[in-house]
Amino acid sequence: MSEEGESIPEDVEIVEEDELEGLKMRVAELEQELQYYAADIANMRQKSAKERSRAIRFGSSSLAGKILPLLSGLERAISLSEGESGEGFLEGTKMTLRGFKAALESEGVTHIESLGKQFDPTKMEAVAMLPATNGIAPGVVIEVIEEGYMLHERVLRASRVIVADSDEDE
């Protein structure tokens, strides 16, 4: 041992200052990469949570799409049998229809109000255009052929409608 300090064992390598600075820079780079990876993982978790929420929210759209033709059939049956006798059948069918509508509404399926409204191509499909009569503005739905429905903000089935057209004299 020397008076100035302890002796350095032979197997220990002395690191020069340049090498030490290089190692410090490499550690800083690795720490930054680690931060980037942590941020990527956090972003993936957020994206996954959003996709899972969306799947849960719209998961029933297939089922709702299959029920809608039944709903339309019941509505047609009621409209065809209203003038005839058979009040029991009619009342039972109306109750079933109300139940169907309530079940669909509980799943987020809502009816698209079309009759008397301005034609909206994002929610309606025009199957015909008829000349507007007095008091009806062009572009207004004058008859609904088939009701439309939405699941939350997504159109399941567009309303099939007849729209008032402007007078041909103009």
Image (tube, helix red, strand yellow):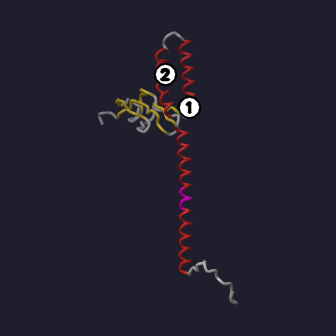
| Quarter of the rendering containing residue 108 | top right
Q: Magenta residues?
A: 36-40
Query: Dot 1, how many residues are within 10 Å of its Cα: few (below 14), some (14-19), or many (20+)?
Result: some
Three-letter residue code for mark 1: Glu
143 lies left or right of 49: left
Q: Which residue is mark 2?
A: 75
Query: Dot 2, how many residues are within 10 Å of its Cα: few (below 14), some (14-19), or many (20+)?
Result: some
* Magenta stretch contains residue 149: no
Q: Residue furthest top?
A: 85
Q: Main secondary structure of the magenta part?
A: helix
Three-letter residue code for mark 2: Glu
Circle 2 SS class: helix
Q: Which residue is mark 1?
A: 105
Observer-nearest residue: 65 or 96? 65
N-terminal label among 1 and 2 = 2
- How far across and how far down the image is residue 115, in percent? 45, 30
Q: Residue furthest left?
A: 169
- How far across and how far down the image is residue 53, in percent? 56, 43
Question: Relative to 64, is 75 above or below?
Answer: above
